[in-house]
Amino acid sequence: MNPQDPHRSHDPSPAARALGLPAGRWADVRGPVHYLEWEGPAGGPTFVLVHGLGGSHLNWVLVAPGLARHGRVLAPDLVGHGHTPVAGRRASIAGQWRLLDGFLRAMDLPPVVLVGNSMGGMLALIEAAHAPEAVDRLVLTNAAFPRPPRWAGRLSLRIAAGFLISGSSLLGPEAMSFWERRLGPDGMLRETFETIAADPRAIDPAVVALEADLLAARIGSREAELAVSTATRSIVRAHLRPWRYRELVRRVGTPALVLHGGVDRLVPRVVAELAVQGHEDWSLEVYPDLGHVPQLEAPDRWLGSVSAWLATAGRARG
């Protein structure tokens, strides 16, 4: 599909039909940005859902319809992720934040409930710090918070090495290309879900099928490899020099619900526990048996937590 043609249509896959996915749409933020939209009741909040590194709008398809009972829901793909091309834009954290901020402005949205997972949580925090007028509330799910002062032993050597290699400007794209050739789409998908989920079997098979289709379309794409490597390198740099990032998190004044899978292999729960300290209007809920993507592993539980917070402590400021 030509990403710059917002009117081009295609028949949805059986998995997309099973999930009732809306047709993809396109916005212009210094280039095309793909997103999905679920309509909600008039007068309700507007939710913008921001996926993590290597993810896409598919990270949210199990919870977006539930959120749409409260208000309008938008799920964009970031630079070089999902169906959004690079199109001359930077895929670093700064570049991804510019796309997110530009998307909110291009869509002419009121202050939104910004919902972020992993890298998406990091971007949501940056937006709330730099453009607080654009963000009414935050829902941070296994957000990539600043690393704790004592990082040793928090990540396995295998995962830490993977981040360092993937983020290398010299080795990153080549390493990803090697593993893509060695594992193939099925192996890459299996490795991904085994890393991000406490129990990959808990994820809806329709989502797995859609992820497989998207991965098969992107595998071997030099643009996609470079985008993920660039974003990874930017995240690693932020965690190697975490004091600036810690200060940014400290100054965020937006009310937040912090949700975290207790057996996350990528973002230890301690970073969420440290992040909420000093924020009187931040609430933390830990799912002891879930991993990095609770919204995919246990969407009903995730939605229950968000709905309860929206009705009580998460009331809009004002």
Image (cartoon, rainbow, N blue to C red):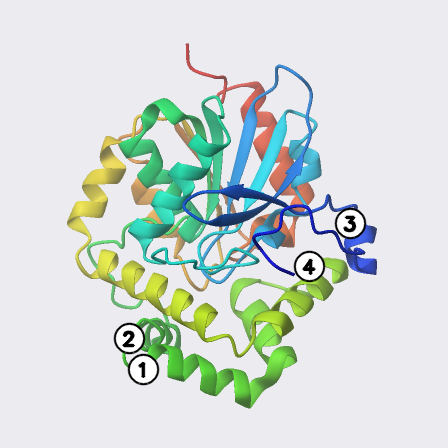
Q: Secondary structure at mark 4?
A: loop
Q: Please, what is the three-letter code of the amino acid marked with disc 2?
A: Ser
Q: Which residue is under mark 4? A: 203
Tell me which label, 3 or 4, sits earlier in the chain: 3
Q: Picture quarter containing residue 182? A: bottom right
Q: Quadrant of residue 11?
A: bottom right
Q: Secondary structure at mark 1?
A: loop
- Sequence-first tag of 2 and 3: 3
Q: Residues within 10 Å of mark 4 (few under 14, many from 20)?
A: some
- Does any portion of residue 272 appear in the rendered image? no
Q: Could you tell whether 146 is left or right of 216 in the image?
A: left
- Amino acid carrying label 3: it is Leu
User: Which callout, 2 or 4, points at the residue further toward the start of the chain?
Assistant: 2
Residue 51, percent across and down?
50, 50
Per the image, the residue denoted by label 1 is 171
Q: Amino acid at mark 4?
A: Ile
Does the CB distance between marks 2 and 4 fall below 8 Å?
no
Residues under numbered marks 4 and 1 in contact, where contact means CB atoms less than 8 Å apart: no
Q: CA distance from mark 4 to mark 1?
A: 32 Å
In whole angstroms, how far apart are the C-alphas of marks 2 and 3? Answer: 37 Å
Residue 165 percent coordinates (x, y): 32, 78
Which residue shows up at 57% across the image and 71% down it?
Answer: 218
Q: Position of residue 287 (x, y in %)?
A: 54, 47
Residue 196 or residue 9, whichever sits in front:
9
Q: What is the C-alpha distance between the residues marked 2 and 1?
A: 5 Å
At x 42%, y 42%, the residue is: 100
Estimate the spatial distance between the alpha carbons at disc 3 and disc 1, rounded to whole Å.
38 Å
Q: Which mark is residue 19?
A: 3
Residue beneath label 2, please? 168
Q: Count of labels shown? A: 4
